[in-house]
Amino acid sequence: MFDYHIVIPARFASSRFPGKPLEMINGKTMLQHVYQVAEKSSAKSIVIATDDQRIFDVANTFCEQVLMTSDQHQSGTDRLAEVCKIKQWADQEIVVNLQGDEPLTPPELLDQVAQNIHENTLASISTLSTPITDIDEIHDANIVKVVSDINGYALYFSRACIPFQRDTENLTLANYYQRHLGIYAYRAGFLNVYNEIPQCELETIEKLEQLRAMYHGHKIHIQQAVKLPGPGIDTPEDLQKIHTILASH
């Protein structure tokens, strides 16, 4: 058996939905719902990392490890990197990023993505995918697609249709059309140098930060998710859907 850590980055200043980690869902904050997902996993420790005093104070009522981090981070990965430095985790420690707006993430996926990177020692990052079952999603720029090699390492991520079938008359939903799920496990050694890795043009034009790691030679391993996650929360309208789903549970 191996140990891994979960870090939940939670910031207040969201352009589309400010303060969403503190929104109430059936008597608990969204952040507490996410934390309770993490508690159901096999993680050795759970850390909430924020840049806001309001979130810090609320998180301290249910989480033993809450860290105040910089308000200058551009991404959740940057915030995880700061947590690694604060906690002084060794390079081989495994860190799973659980988004603070994903209360319907099956805990099995947290264990799966950690197991994935543990078993694939060449990977700096591991993540998950699921087959695309709706042909319209192939061309939806809001859905990130991934293509991997024979050993499960990512070849490329894109918002475009990959792979592209030149013979469109016979377009089929074959198993190689994979939708990327935004759940990651990292080796702490990668996170410790992440801030030193410069952005690349591919990352800038696709708006996909994982391309920075691949461009600079870091391997990302992909597995098909053992369960499908529920929807995340990006807008107030999404929140109402989550109310209904959690109430039914």
Image (cartoon, rainbow, N blue to C red):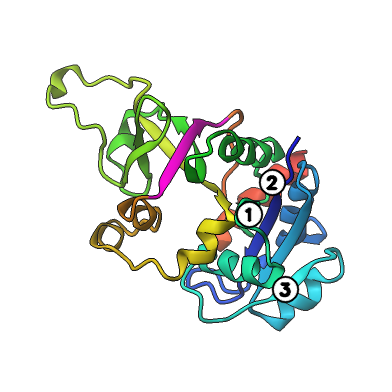
| Magenta-drawn segment | 218-225
Inspect this view and state whether residue 24 appears.
no
Farthest residue toward the top? 170
Looking at the rendered structure, the secondary structure element under dot 3 is: strand
Task: From the top left corner, tell me how far across and down residue 156 is, in percent.
Answer: 31, 42
Cβ atoms under marks 2 and 1 closer than 8 Å: yes
Does 87 lie within the magenta span? no
Percent of width and height locating residue 200: 28, 63
Q: Nearer the viewer, residue 79 or 130?
A: 79
Q: CA distance from mark 2 to mark 3?
A: 31 Å
Q: Which residue is at a point 63% across and 73% down the rendered structure image? A: 19
Mark 3, residue position: 67
Secondary structure under tag 2 reads: helix
Work out whether mark 2 precedes mark 3 in sequence or the reverse, and give the earlier one: 3
Q: Which residue is mark 1?
A: 240
Q: Callout 3, which amino acid?
A: Leu
- Does label 3 or label 1 sit earlier along the sequence? 3
Would residue 247 be visible to someone looking at this image? yes
- Amino acid type, residue under disc 2 in the picture: Thr
Please name the residue shown 82% across and 59% down the image.
27
- Asked whether, in this view, residue 111 is left or right of residue 156, the answer is right
The spot of residue 215 in percent (x, y) is 30, 53
Label 2 sits on residue: 244
Q: Main secondary structure of the magenta part?
A: strand
